[in-house]
Amino acid sequence: MPRSIFLVAWEFQVRRGAEPRFEEIYGSAGLWAKLFASDPAYLRTELQRDLRHPGRYLTLDYWISESAYDQFHASHAAAYEAMDRQCEELTEREALVGRFVMIP
């Protein structure tokens, strides 16, 4: 396991009725995770559903480093943007929570 792990966290408000499709696409075995998995620096994705606020989710994408994530994002920008546009209809809101590093 790498010494420090980089995490990108996103918050989503999912449209009512779109939750099953959103969970399928954004979950740990979904389309986003499959795209990321093409890079050996990708570690995993977690999808969290808020128990108190219906339709609110967090995605947590783990990478070996911030630079590895940035390099992946730059080299896969077209695929990333195309998938993002395809998934827009599932959500009312999407916001970057932050970019974090795990403290060993």
Image (tube, rainbow, N blue to C red):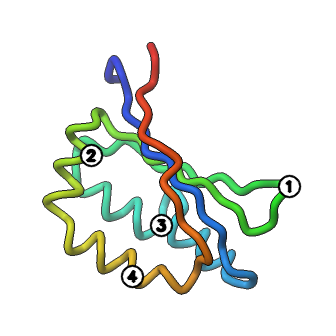
Q: Nearer the viewer, mark 3 or mark 2?
A: 2
Circle 3 — which element?
A: loop
| Occupied quadrant, residue 27 | bottom right
Q: Amino acid at mark 1?
A: Arg
Q: Amino acid at mark 2?
A: Tyr
Name the N-terminal-most of marks 3 and 2.
3
Q: Identify the residue position indicated by label 4 in the image.
A: 85
Name the N-terminal-most of marks 4 and 1.
1
Classed neighbour count for the residue bearing mark 3: other residues with Cα under 10 Å, few (<14), some (14–19), many (≥20): some
- Seen at 40% across and 65% down, the residue is 32
> For the image shown, how many numbered marks are present on the structure?
4
Q: Identify the residue position indicated by label 3 in the image.
A: 30
- Seen at 22% across and 47% down, the residue is 70
Name the N-terminal-most of marks 1 and 3.
3
Q: Identify the residue position indicated by label 1 in the image.
A: 52
Above/below status of 36 relative to 86 = above
Instruction: For marks 1 and 3, give the CA distance.
Output: 24 Å
Left or right of 78 in this view: 33: right
Q: Where the N terminus falls, by quadrant? A: top left
